């Protein structure tokens, strides 16, 4: 990884009176004054404040020079301990851009903190600030020895990547592909040994040099030990003087991962208590059910000027690490869970027990979980008699952003419905139509309701085909803007046709340019690109659409594209974005490409596609440049500090880490958040990730990423049980 830009000047202190030796000026605070206590500046933080910025200690008129490196350090305490300060350097005037931030959990005794970052802009209007509001209870904040030193050497972040032999730390199937990546300067083949848990050598061979892997910048070799087909645990690979992290040979872990990745959704539920007996360590009161300090989702108004009605939009899943709920991301996530269930009907693979409140009601648990989101999506539809009836509101979330940590039931922000959009309306149409065919045997009344809502939504979208969510609507929640909806029309028409068989939807599909287009790009599908969802279901769900052979052939052709990419990749990844710019949530892009490969296996029964999925799973579970699993609780070293307001153990030891089976977003070349920028500037693709709760652009968790993991884990579990 390249270091940050070099310092442009001698070290210069930018903060005035950071040690408070001459009183508190020019520091300011709001709402309460600063007082000096034992040489520290302290302020009383009132309880029942809403936002972090409701209570601030700061100093303005700070000079910054673009590209220069600064060390931001201070000593701070919070009494009682456990409170979190948002320490930042940013613009003191609109638009209040944050250049760097950190959120340390303070102790009563006090600690010293130090961070280095490169300034992204030149300004004489910067500020150093500590935002300390948003607490239900009052506390006291004290700070001392505040420094912003310019011209310091760059702090080069070097991740601990462990042994240079990179393996799937969870397990390989005994009859599946078994490959590892060796990072080495050697250009000639090297000997390797496979050892069992007792240390005995059970297989040996020589590596295959691959040259420099573009996605990591590393010189790599491939170790292929696929010929060893016995099961067991505690295996290691030894090569070039390095011993890999341990792994198993067996499929049992994938049955557990199938369940854990789905259990994630229960702890993401809004509007219901999370029970300790169902998720030990994750119990919490119901969020956003109109109980103070929540302002609740039971009677939510629109943003000013958007509508003059209110809706009950309780329930659903919190989208990610915030408290927002979004129809477009909820749509693709729900589709993937329902698709997993629908595949289980074709393959007779079954679905796991998930220990949800509805368990035992004679409905598969996966359908109970998806129903929680489906009921919410239906509530987001504009009621009959209102303007734009039948359309769906794009999202509902807080009026302003909240800080970390913050449990859902403690969120004090007003909630708002955002404008309707064509994309959201078509997401509702697609998932409701899909639901209608899958819930019919369990709840015919709900199936009829869902189908009626889907037809209404599709007709409403046809009448208003270009109502887009604005890119600027990103205060308090993500924008999820999308101004290309031909893919959403195609997906919705596909689901309606598969459920009803009606000619009007078949005609729409056959007339759509999307129907004959190559929809399998560098990432097959995501919330903003949904055509492949329709294409996959048309290929796999029994139907009588004319030209099905061509539809199925297009899926196989897409899989062949990903297969070729994987074979050329030093880490066996079926993903190669343009210019080596890995996307936000790259792990889900990889998994969605793997779903196409798995679908090709279902269509052709060719083992090469099954093996491609298995090898793709290796990357997620440890065979990568960082030598870590991206799935919490799976592998010797795994992501466990994902960005979340309630799985925030890194900030508050009283809170848990994300639950086992949670997927981190993964490498993101654009590193949009300040923390990642302070550590990863100049990173090469796979290295653009850091397991820190402050890195929302590389380390968030979301429902659509876990739905992708769940689908693929179910596929692997099904083929593991069959081979």
Image (cartoon, helix red, strand yellow):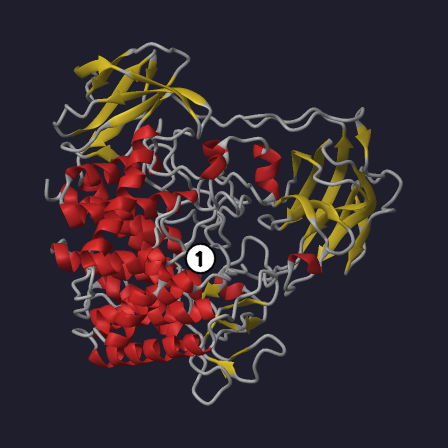
Closest to the observer, 215 or 635: 215
Q: Is residue 84 above or below residue 75?
A: below
* Residue 130 picture location, percent across and down: 71, 49
500 with respect to 638 (left or right): left
Closest to the observer, 150 or 453: 453
Q: Is residue 244 above or below residue 714?
A: above
* Residue 546 picture location, percent across and down: 20, 64
| Quarter location, residue 510 | bottom left
Q: Residue at x 15, y 44 (%)?
A: 719
Whether residue 276 is visible: no
Q: Residue at x 50, y 35 (%)?
A: 688
The residue beneath circle 1 is 528
Quadrant where the N terminus is found in the figure: top right
| Quarter location, residue 557 | top left
Q: Is residue 356 above or below residue 161?
A: below
* Residue 361 picture location, percent across and down: 19, 70
* Residue 91 picture location, percent across and down: 75, 49
Q: Is residue 670 above or below residue 264?
A: above
Q: Residue at x 22, y 43 (%)?
A: 254
In what element is the residue under mark 1?
loop
């Amino acid at each position: 990884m390249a270091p940050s830009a070099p310092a442009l000047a001698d070290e210069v202190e930018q903060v005035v009176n950071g040690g408070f030796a001459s009183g508190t000026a020019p520091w300011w605070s709001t709402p309460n004054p600063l007082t000096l206590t034992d040489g520290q500046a302290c302020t009383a933080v009132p309880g029942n404040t809403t936002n972090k910025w409701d209570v601030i200690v700061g100093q303005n008129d700070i000079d910054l020079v673009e590209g220069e490196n600064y060390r931001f350090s201070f000593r701070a305490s919070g009494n009682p301990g456990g409170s979190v300060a948002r320490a930042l350097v940013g613009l003191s005037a609109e638009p209040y851009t944050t250049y760097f931030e950190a959120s340390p959990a303070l102790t009563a005794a006090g600690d010293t903190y130090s961070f280095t970052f490169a300034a992204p802009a030149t300004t004489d209007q910067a500020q150093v600030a500590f935002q300390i509001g948003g607490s239900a209870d009052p506390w006291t904040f004290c700070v001392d020895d505040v420094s912003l030193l310019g011209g310091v050497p760059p702090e080069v972040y070097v991740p601990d990547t462990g042994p240079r032999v990179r393996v799937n730390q969870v397990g390989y199937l005994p009859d599946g592909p078994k490959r590892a990546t060796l990072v080495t300067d050697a250009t000639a083949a090297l000997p390797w040994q496979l050892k069992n848990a007792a240390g005995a050598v059970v297989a040996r061979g020589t590596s295959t040099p691959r040259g420099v892997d573009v996605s990591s910048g590393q010189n790599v070799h491939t170790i292929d030990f696929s010929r060893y087909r016995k099961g067991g645990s505690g295996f290691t690979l030894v090569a070039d003087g390095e011993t890999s992290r341990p792994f198993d040979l067996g499929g049992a872990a994938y049955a557990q991962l199938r369940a854990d990745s789905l259990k994630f959704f229960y702890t993401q539920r809004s509007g219901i208590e999370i029970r300790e007996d169902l998720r030990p360590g994750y119990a919490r009161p119901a969020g956003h059910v109109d109980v103070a300090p929540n302002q609740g989702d039971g009677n939510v108004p629109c943003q000013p000027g958007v509508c003059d009605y209110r809706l009950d939009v309780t329930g659903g899943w919190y989208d990610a690490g915030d408290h927002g709920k979004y129809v477009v991301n909820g749509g693709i996530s729900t589709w993937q869970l329902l698709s997993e269930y629908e595949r289980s009907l074709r393959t007779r693979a079954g679905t796991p027990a998930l220990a949800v409140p509805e368990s035992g009601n004679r409905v598969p648990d996966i359908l109970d979980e998806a129903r929680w989101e489906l009921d919410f999506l239906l509530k987001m539809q504009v009621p009959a008699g209102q303007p734009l009836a039948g359309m769906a509101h794009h999202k509902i979330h807080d009026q302003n952003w909240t800080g970390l940590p913050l449990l859902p039931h403690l969120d004090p922000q007003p909630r708002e419905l955002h404008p309707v959009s064509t994309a959201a309306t078509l997401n509702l149409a697609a998932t409701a139509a899909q639901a209608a065919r899958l819930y019919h045997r369990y709840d015919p009344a709900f199936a009829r309701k869902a189908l009626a809502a889907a037809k209404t939504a599709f007709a409403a979208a046809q009448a208003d085909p270009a109502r887009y969510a604005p890119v600027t609507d990103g205060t308090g929640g993500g924008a999820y803007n999308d101004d290309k909806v031909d893919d959403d029309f195609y997906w919705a028409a596909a689901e309606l046709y598969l459920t009803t068989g009606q000619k009007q939807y078949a005609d729409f599909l056959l007339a759509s340019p999307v129907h004959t287009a190559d929809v399998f790009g560098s990432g097959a599908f995501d919330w903003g690109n949904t055509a492949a969802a329709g294409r996959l279901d048309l290929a796999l769900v029994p139907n009588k659409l004319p030209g099905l052979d061509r539809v199925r052939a297009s899926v196989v052709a897409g899989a062949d594209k990903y297969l070729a990419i994987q074979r050329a990749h030093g880490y066996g990844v079926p993903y190669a974005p343009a210019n080596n710019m890995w996307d936000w949530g790259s792990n889900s892009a990889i998994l969605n490409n793997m779903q196409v490969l798995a679908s090709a296996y279902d269509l052709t029964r060719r083992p090469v596609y099954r093996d491609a999925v298995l090898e793709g799973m290796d990357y997620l579970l440890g065979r990568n440049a960082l030598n870590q699993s991206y799935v919490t609780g799976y592998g010797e070293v795994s992501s466990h500090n994902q960005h979340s307001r309630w799985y925030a153990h890194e900030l508050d030891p009283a809170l848990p880490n994300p639950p086992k089976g949670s997927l981190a977003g993964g490498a993101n070349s654009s590193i949009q958040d300040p923390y990642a920028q302070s550590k990863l500037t100049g990173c090469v693709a796979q290295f653009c990730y850091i397991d820190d709760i402050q890195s929302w652009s590389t380390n968030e968790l979301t429902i659509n990423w876990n739905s992708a993991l769940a689908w693929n884990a179910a596929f692997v579990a099904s083929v593991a049980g069959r081979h």
